[in-house]
Image: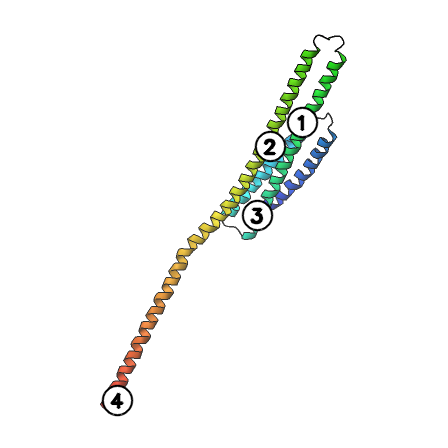
Amino acid sequence: MLTVLLLKKARKLEAQLDEQINLYRKLVAAKGDVNEKDLESGIDHLLKQLQHVNSQMQIWVSSGSSEVFSHTLTRHQEILHDFTQEFYRLRSSLRAAQEHASLLKNYGVSDQSKGDLEDGSSAEQALLREQAALSRGTGQIDNVISQAQATFGELVLQRSTFSGISYKISNVSSRLPSVNHILSAIKRRKSMDTIILSLVASTCTFLILLYWLSK
């Protein structure tokens, strides 16, 4: 069944993401001079795959699946949102740590050579201050981008939720005309039964009167 396959794939991707993000968290905590690009690329690829699976499940929900599956989809969307936010937060922290380490390294080189370059030290200090300001600006931009991406994930989740609600409302609305038709038919049938009973009662009363008058 398609739903079972999608759920299995989603759980497998979530398990892989949990493992990869834990590795990435350790890398950020170590703050070592390592190549994190491959790990970041792998996590980003897994996030996109999980988003695609969730989109397929959303299509299935919109086509009229069970209420239970709709709640299950919402949970998987929340998991994707949490993984995405955590990945962006860790990546921003790593970038800030790398920028800080680079500044310290450049400052150390400058400090060692300032005896020979006394006249140029002020210019180097100004350059370092400018680089620090740029690094802070870059970190702030990364944070803004991360927040924007997290907000986008929340909007996607809300859109999926509202789509499910809209489908349910449309489904109920589509059924209401038939329900109203059935109720109207029952009312008409009840009215006809009342008229027939009244006619039968009147006829019986009339016949009884004729019988007594004829005696």
80 up-or-down from 64: above or below = above
Residue occupying image coordinates x 55% and y 44%: 57
Residue tagged 4: 212
Q: Picture quarter containing residue 213?
A: bottom left
Residue tagged 2: 146
Q: Are marks 3 and 2 in contact (CB under 8 Å)?
A: no
Residue 101, x across and y down, in percent: 71, 23
Viewer-proximal residue among 170 and 158 = 158
Residue 60, x across and y down, in percent: 52, 46
Crowd tier of the residue under label 4, counting other residues whose Cα lies within 10 Å: few below 14, some 14–19, many 20 or above? few
Q: Are marks 1 and 4 in contact (CB under 8 Å)?
A: no
Q: Which badge, 1 or 2, is on the more N-terminal residue?
A: 1
Instruction: Determine whether, in the image, residue 195 is placed left or right of residue 17.
Output: left
Looking at this rendering, what residue extends furthest in the bottom direction? 215
For badge 4, the amino acid type reads Trp
Q: CA distance from mark 1 to mark 3?
A: 42 Å
Q: Which badge, 1 or 3, is on the more N-terminal residue?
A: 3
60 up-or-down from 36: above or below = below
Q: Which badge, 1 or 4, is on the more N-terminal residue?
A: 1
For badge 2, the amino acid type reads Ser
Q: Which badge, 4 or 3, is on the more N-terminal residue?
A: 3
Q: CA distance from mark 4 to mark 3?
A: 78 Å
For badge 3, the amino acid type reads Thr
Nearer to us of marks 1 and 3 is 1
Residue 133, x across and y down, in percent: 64, 21
For badge 1, the amino acid type reads Ala
Secondary structure beneath dot 4 equals helix
Residue tagged 3: 3
Viewer-proximal residue among 134 and 197 = 134
